[in-house]
Amino acid sequence: VLFLFVCSPSPCSFHWIRKAEEQPESLDPCDINGPHFDPELFLNKLRRECSLAELMDQETCMVKQIRSLDSDMQTLVYENYNKFISATDTIRKMKNDFKKMEDEMDCLSANMAAITEFSARISGTLQDQHAQITKLSGVHTLLRKLQFLFELPARLNKCLELQAYAQAVRSHRRARCVLQQYSHLPSFKGIQDDCHAIMDKLAQELRQKFRDGGSSAKDLSECVELLLQLDEPAEELCDKFLSHAQSRLESDLQGLEAEIRPYPTIPSPTSNTDILEFIDRGCNEFVSSLCLVITSYQELFINHAQKGELLNAFVDDLAARYFSLVERRIQEEKGVADNSLLVRALDRFHRRLQAVTKLLPGSAVPNQGTEIVIRAATERVKQYLSALQSFYMDSLTDVRQALATPRDAPNSLPELLSSLSASILNQIKSVLASVHLFTAKDITFSNKPYFKGEFCSQGVRESLVVSFIKFVCQSSRQFCESAGDKGGSTPPALLLLLSRLCLDYETSTISYILTLTDEQFLVQHHSPVTPVTTLCAEAREAAQKLLNHYVKVQGLIISQMLRKSVETRDWVNTIEPRNVRAVMKRVVEDTTSIDVQVGLLYEEGVRKAHSSDSSKRTFSVYSSSRQQARYAASYTPSAPMDTNLLSNIHKLFSERIDIFSSVEFNKVSVMTGIIKISLKTFLECVRLRTFGRYGLQQIQVDCHYLQMYLWRFVSDENLVHFMLDEIVGSSAHRCLDPAPMEQSVIEVICERG
Amino acid sequence: MEDDAPVIYGLEFQARALTAQTAETDAIRFLVGTQSLKFDNQIHIIDFDDENNIINKNVLLHQAGEIWHIGASPADKAVLTTCYNKTSDSRVVSCAAVWRMPSDWETGSHESPDDSAHNPQTLELLCHLDDSAHSNAACVLWEPMGDGKRVISLADNHALLWDLQESSTQATVSSTATLEGKGQLKFTSGKWSPHHNCSQLATANDTAIRGWDLRTMSQIYCIENAHGQLVRDLDFNPNRQYYLASCGDDCKVKFWDVRNVQEPVKSLEEHSHWVWSVRYNHSHDQLVLTASSDSRLILSNMVSISSEPFGHLVDDEELSEGEDNHQEDNQSNKKKKKVLINYSSFE
């Protein structure tokens, strides 16, 4: 720094340089601050370019600048000078200090040399003593060892007395090598012999204890461990160990077996433990000791790898017996009341077996256990199915009884239906909920592939829900068949109710139940399952069959009345009709009540448009014009052929009536079916009889009466007209003296009665 | 049958009675009895010529009354029985009688077939099958394959076995069997079994079918509730002695093994109304013809319960409609026509 200030070429140029540094781009030689400044050029330029005044100004300015630069330089020099002075002082001071330090350092080195000398002297003095001490401590250790050896027999004896076998064995093991090594010395030999004698005794005692078998699994394994350490033959021990373990496990199993009722029929359910307790006991006693045996076996005989198979066989054998017991117990579990108990028991059973899996990775035991769980689950599903089925049958019996009690029976039909279907649905739901426990998250076996897939789809969906629906359809069909031969042992109302039930199933319930199942069980359909449509079709078929059967049964009841009324009367010698026969009124009454009954469960249905006054107008047409024409033709002896021809041709063109045909699911169709059957019977019966004049007239009156009331029930009133027409026509044909009654008289009689 | 037009024969009156004449071996011949309250009833003798596919008819007068049942003697082709209704004094009485056709009906009809309709000859009465105690005959059964000497008539709740003597001019009751039970029991139909030396009879009353031993006149089996309702007709399998077909008002046709009457061997439900009549084909017992008041005839091929279940009719299914009928023109045609006529006039 000093140098810089002293040696700077000139304060002015310094100033310029600094300025030039700030503007390095200036290359102009006339720039007074630039590095390429040429004074000559500058002066010439000034002289050439500027006026005198400007030159004067320039000069003044320059002088001014030079003066200020000079003063700046003076200030700087002063300051630097001061600094230079203080630096010189500092250097002088430092020189003094260094001198002092040098003296001290000399002193230190001298001291150090003295210390080194001392130290060497001391260690030389202590050398001998140190060697002696080392030797002494070695002798001391040896002596302690020897003392241990000499004391060993006594110590071992004491241990033996105290039954501290483990300590004894530990001590002996410590001494054994040494004794072996120095056995050529007579004193050591003596000790060794003593020890051997004691240890043999100990081994004897251990073996005795081992043989006794009364000790716990832990003691036993301890025993075996000690024996092993005493170099007993491993295989023999292994066998013995297993046989001991077996005997103890067997006693556990016997205890379990005793819990299972020897005779399942003994009616003392309270005295028996429930399945959860049973499984608990099995787990706590058998499975845990089995695990203990496995663990200790593996620990003890870890070096004897070939023994693994022996253990596996041992475990498999015992586990098989345990499983058979468990299965027997599970099979006794017949009541379906509380599924959670069984599921919990199975869960515990399964969970405890996991321990065995961990201990014995290759064992088949857990798989067998899972299979038992699966079997139990399947069995349970079957039991639920049969429970559902019996519940359904019981409900039907209840409904039957409700129908049999005549008190307001017809009104309660819809209520019966709804309560029946609701109770069935509830039952299904509760069963599903129970079965659902098998797949609950916290159950260990629920994440097995079986319970995720097959159990849901095949077990629950197919063999429980689908089977039940099929059963419902099946049993409904059976009602049709069994009742067919015995002439209606099933009350017709029940048929009607079941038909409606099946129809409801078809329209909504089946899909609802299946959706519910699928949602609850998240059924993954790996295997083919019964589609909803199949079940619906089945239900519909059942509904159709039931309804057809209902029509048939009701039709037959009315037919029976009509037939009896036709067959038992002497139609030749009857009196002139004054009234409608009572049986016809009965027919109309019954038809009306059937109509009410069916109307409770089925919709009205469509019918063809009525003529304005159905009960009268059409009848009068049928009766007066066409029928009269036929009578006229029929009973003119000259043309018997024409009548037949006419009626036959008429029949050819009229629609054929299927009597026992299928009906649709509505009231009108049902009623049409019943009335068709009844009238057809009436017709056939009439054709087998012979009528007198009044007989024919009675039939006319009866038919008119039926006409007045029956048209309103059927879909196509022409059908009733046609059939009644046939009846009157046939009776006229079978009449000895066909003189039909006046239409007006018929009407009067009918209206009166 | 493929190219043959169906043969139709029309009657003037309604008819319910028809039988095939088994004593006639040369021709296929049927007897039809008419029902008319107003006019004299007739018996139509119909010959079917299966080579030319035409029919010839002759008419005989049956003046006694309307015919409900007809039976032809298995031995004498001129002898027949009828059950008929007679109306007298405004009372209707059911009777049964044995008749003989006039000897020259055949010649007369061939010369002038048109005249025969206008001037029909009358049947000659041989004897009545009634006595004061038993009337209301439902049907008369000839002993099948017999010598035409024995008939059974079913009247109300009695089955009467008649011996016909002196060329059928005298009839005496040789034994009777009576149906006993609650209510008014009445035989509706019956069939004389061709098996067991013609010693068995099957009858129908209400919903039950009963079997009788004619030697002791005692019941040997009873199928209670054979049908849901009235049993209308029965027929024995011509080849299998224990097999029986029945039909009734429950629209069903059932096949029974009379050794086990608990369950029918088979049950058909093809008809949509009462089945009035059921017949086996005489030589091919897998063919069963049924007639019903739903105006339908159904010919069923029941191979599984025939006498030759696995025999030569393996490809029967294919043949059943065409070939089969053709082969067995005689019998199945006979049957077919029988019931056709029966119910075309009826319905």
Image (spheres, coloured by chain):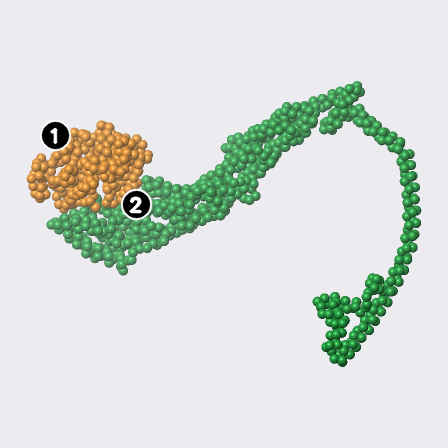
The 10 Å Cα crowd at callout 1, few under 14, some 14 to 19, many 20 or more, is: few
| Residue B225 location, quadrant | top left
User: Can the viewer see residue A693 in this picture?
Assistant: no
Q: Chain of mark 1?
A: B
Chain coloured orange here: B
SS for dot 1? loop
Position of the C terminus of chain A, as image quadrant, is bottom left
Where does the image place residue A473, in percent across and percent down from the top left?
39, 43
Q: Is residue A392 left or right of residue B30?
A: right
Q: Which mark is residue A556?
A: 2
Q: For this view, does B30 lie left or right of residue A61?
A: left
Q: Colour of chain A?
A: green
Vertical placement of A615 versus B156: above or below? below
Q: Position of residue A733 (x, y in %)?
A: 18, 48
Q: Nearer the viewer, residue A205 or A342?
A: A205
Numbered label attached to residue B166:
1
